Image (cartoon, rainbow, N blue to C red):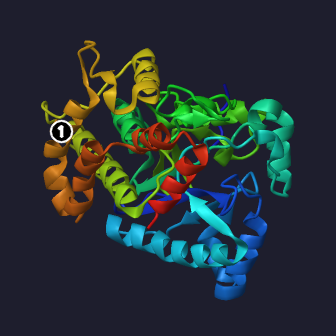
Amino acid sequence: MSNESVDFIGSPSPTLGVEWEFALVDRDTRDLSNSAAALIDGVVAQAGEGITAKVHKELLRNTVELVSGVSTTVAEAVADVAESLELVRSVGDGLGVDLYGAGTHPFAQWSTQLLTEGHRYAELIERTQWWGRQMLIWGVHVHVGISHRDKVLPIISALLKYYPHLLALSASSPMWSGQDTAYASNRAMMFQQLPTAGLPFQFTRWDEFEGFVADQKTTGIIDHLNEIRWDIRPSPHLGTIEVRICDGVSNTRELSALVALTHCLIVYLDRTLTQRRLGDPNATLPDMAPWLVQENKWRAARYGLDAIIIQDAQCNERLVTEDLADILVELAPIAAELSCVEELAGVEEIIRRGASYQRQRAVFERTADLRDVVSSVVAELG
């Protein structure tokens, strides 16, 4: 295995970046609307070309992505995307289009969706075919700055312990093609079908990752590093770890909670790693075997906040919400330092109120109309 140098541009502080994906839905039919090009044209007409750094097109024309700038706090990052959100919604009003924040749409058909123009998108579909065309999925990605490349892979491996917590809280994709899948997050199961997606390999050294990248490029699996679509991945050019676990989110309060939890967890693991390297015998990073991580992902996708997860290498098990209660207590001092105490408290609100997948099912139980499910998710945006 030959290596290819992958430079990691370290971040001097744990800065934040947020990417928030939305589906576009027709205001009357509640089906997906292939109107992203017109929407983005309208946004540019109002705000100028510079807005394209904050409002992105995606693989399919039914999707837009809102992107924050580099931020120092959760409040700053969420306020940034919320500002773009207001502009996009106002343009959408003129097009008869609403923004829909969930992991999947409950009844849309993949065969009616249009591909965004561009060589990269066309090549992806040419390679992945049926599975690529099925990707009617939306999520939230959170970037956290890391100071040095040698920290990145140990932190990613340790963060996998908390994978089911983030997925269960954000799960918002219970329905697919007109049916309830019985999963809380069908999106998590769908996305991993792409050849470079799914759980990350648990490398321990940066040169192992470089060897992996070299093999991927030599064999034509990828042309560019960003084609590695892991649920958690290094973003070397940004100097971050990018967490891509979460389903789409319907409102800024829950977005803030998930971003705060992600931020606090990574800073907590970063500090633990530093203490361990300084010789602290009590500083230990979580170590979960890949097969346990895989099982936890499936349990969270299937059962959401009712998942009983595997906690450690000794295979102790616990209800995910009980584990979250203890995690929030442990993270409280870091939340205070990162100025996100209020945002982190939103995690408990999600548990009390019910996650999006639970709320969607409750709407369908009351009305038996999937269009009402779409409308309920749209309404949560406020």
Q: Is residue 192 left or right of residue 340?
A: right
Check disc 1 and report the residue beneath it. 325
**What residue is shown at x 66% (from left), y 59% (from top)?**
24
Q: Nearer the viewer, residue 234 or 39?
A: 39
Image position, residue 202 (x, y; %): 47, 27
Q: Is residue 66 left or right of residue 27?
A: left
Q: Nearer the viewer, residue 327 or 168?
A: 168
Image position, residue 129 (x, y; %): 83, 33
The quadrant the N terminus occupies is top right
Q: Is residue 90 visible?
A: yes
Furthest residue toward top: 314
Q: Nearer the viewer, residue 305 or 243?
A: 305
Q: Is residue 292 above or below residue 152?
A: above
**What residue is shown at x 77% (from left), y 67% (from top)?**
37
Q: Is residue 100 above or below residue 185?
A: below
Amino acid type at circle 1 is Ala
Q: Which element carries disc 1, helix, strand or loop?
A: helix
**What residue is shown at x 60% (from left), y 74% (from top)?**
88
Dot 1, crowdedness within 10 Å: few (<14), some or many (≥20)? Answer: few
Tell me where residue 227 sits by quadrant. top right
**What residue is shown at x 41% (from left), y 28% (from top)?**
300
Image position, residue 208 (x, y; %): 54, 30
Q: Is residue 376 above or below residue 159?
A: below
Q: Is residue 159 visible?
A: no
Q: Nearer the viewer, residue 122 or 110?
A: 110
The quadrant the C terminus occupies is bottom left
Image position, residue 297 (x, y; %): 44, 26
